[in-house]
Image: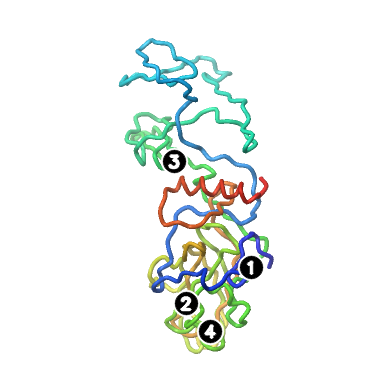
């Protein structure tokens, strides 16, 4: 199947063994948080809520007491007053307040923001006093309070940046088939883990590279087939970010050909291989993995950047957008 993204797979496009940094032991792949869209999976224009101050500060802050007018083109400081500036209306056909910004951002082809919320220093709202509060926090999350009878509480706002979507491939992609040497190219650590015919050895774990299909996925959906086993056993399929799980993904008898559908998380293997899953065998067997879909963040920018072990989620999203624009992917 044709690749859906511009990134090449191991063994293709010039990637060498020197590009691969193997984990110290099975289960050492790195867990990651938010991940990205299919390499070219229907990308359209989208905006992500930013964080900053309201208005452009072109002059020094202006002190303001209760009843003082608000000055344009400057920051207005109300000091420690706990009385909010309020705008009320009693018209049921028009809004109480309208903000507009007709300026065009020529560098990105979009309009400037009409409203920007200054993030608090907290990672979540410290108070939810009424239903209807909207708060931006230090990690870039937008929160909204709900005034239920049991008391108001704050919940993150589901946006294109925070919500996941199910994204099926146009056709299943055979990522691994250990029966053929050419179909083992996506096994990151094949050396020492396969027998002479390519079967996964009993007690061994291999990591499967999915970079040719996706940028920073959250989860993968695939069909797993077992065939040519030497004896009865089972396979474990998981992200690889933890030790081998105790629950099996598929159980098989000796020489049996059997398949099962699997869904599991995706992890980072190294800074150059950012989408892997792990497969562990209790008995030596051939296996086939056909990927059908991914779970991805729903905002439409493909997040293509080198994986890092540090940095905030908001910074990762910003790097992803910059990388996509630099990559020349049309919106």
Are the residues tagged 1 and 3 within 8 Å (C-beta)? no
First reached walking from the N terminus: tag 4 or tag 1: 1
Instruction: Determine crowd level at label 2: few under 14, some 14-19, many 20+ residues with C-alpha closer than 10 A.
Output: many
Separation of residues labelled 2 and 1 (CA atoms): 31 Å
Q: Residue at x 51, y 57 (%)?
A: 306
> Residue 298 in the image: x percent, y percent?
56, 48
Instruction: Determine crowd level at label 1: few under 14, some 14-19, many 20+ residues with C-alpha closer than 10 A.
Output: few
Residue identified by numbered label 4: 199
> Residue 197 in the image: x percent, y percent?
56, 88
Residue identified by numbered label 1: 13
Name the element at disc 3.
loop
Residue identified by numbered label 3: 140
Name the element at disc 2.
strand
Instruction: Determine crowd level at label 4: few under 14, some 14-19, many 20+ residues with C-alpha closer than 10 A.
Output: many
Q: Residue at x 65, y 49 (%)?
A: 328
Can you tell which mark lies on residue 235? 2
First reached walking from the N terminus: tag 3 or tag 4: 3
Can you tell which mark lies on residue 304? none
Quadrant where the C terminus sits is top right
Separation of residues labelled 4 and 1 (CA atoms): 26 Å
């Amino acid at each position: 199947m044709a690749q859906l993204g511009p990134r090449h797979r191991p063994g293709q496009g010039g990637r060498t063994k020197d590009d691969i940094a193997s984990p110290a032991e099975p289960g050492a792949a790195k867990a990651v948080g938010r991940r990205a869209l299919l390499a070219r999976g229907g990308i359209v224009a989208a905006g992500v809520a930013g964080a900053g101050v309201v208005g452009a500060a072109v002059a020094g802050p202006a002190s303001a007491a209760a009843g003082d007018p608000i000055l344009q083109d400057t920051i207005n400081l109300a000091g420690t007053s706990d009385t909010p500036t309020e705008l009320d209306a009693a018209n049921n056909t028009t809004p109480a307040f309208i903000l507009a910004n007709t300026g065009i951002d020529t560098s990105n082809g979009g309009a400037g923001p009409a409203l920007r919320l200054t993030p608090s220093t907290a990672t979540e709202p410290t108070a939810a006093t009424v239903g209807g509060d909207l708060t931006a926090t230090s990690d870039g999350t937008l929160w909204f309070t709900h005034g239920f009878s049991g008391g108001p509480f704050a919940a993150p706002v589901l946006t294109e940046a925070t919500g996941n979507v199910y994204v099926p491939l146009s056709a299943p992609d055979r990522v691994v088939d250990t029966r053929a040497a050419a179909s083992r190219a996506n096994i990151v650590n094949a050396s020492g883990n396969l027998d002479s015919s390519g079967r996964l050895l009993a007690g061994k774990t291999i990591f499967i590279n999915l970079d040719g299909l996706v940028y920073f996925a959250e989860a993968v959906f695939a069909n797993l087939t077992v065939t040519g086993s030497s004896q009865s056993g089972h396979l474990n399929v998981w992200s690889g970010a933890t030790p081998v799980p105790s629950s099996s993904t598929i159980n098989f008898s000796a020489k049996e050909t059997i398949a099962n559908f699997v869904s599991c998380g995706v992890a980072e293997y190294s800074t150059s291989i950012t989408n892997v899953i792990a497969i562990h065998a209790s008995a030596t067997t051939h296996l086939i993995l056909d990927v059908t879909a991914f779970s991805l963040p729903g905002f439409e920018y493909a997040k293509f950047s080198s994986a890092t072990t540090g940095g905030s989620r908001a910074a990762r999203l910003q790097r992803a957008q910059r990388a996509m624009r630099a990559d020349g992917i049309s919106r």
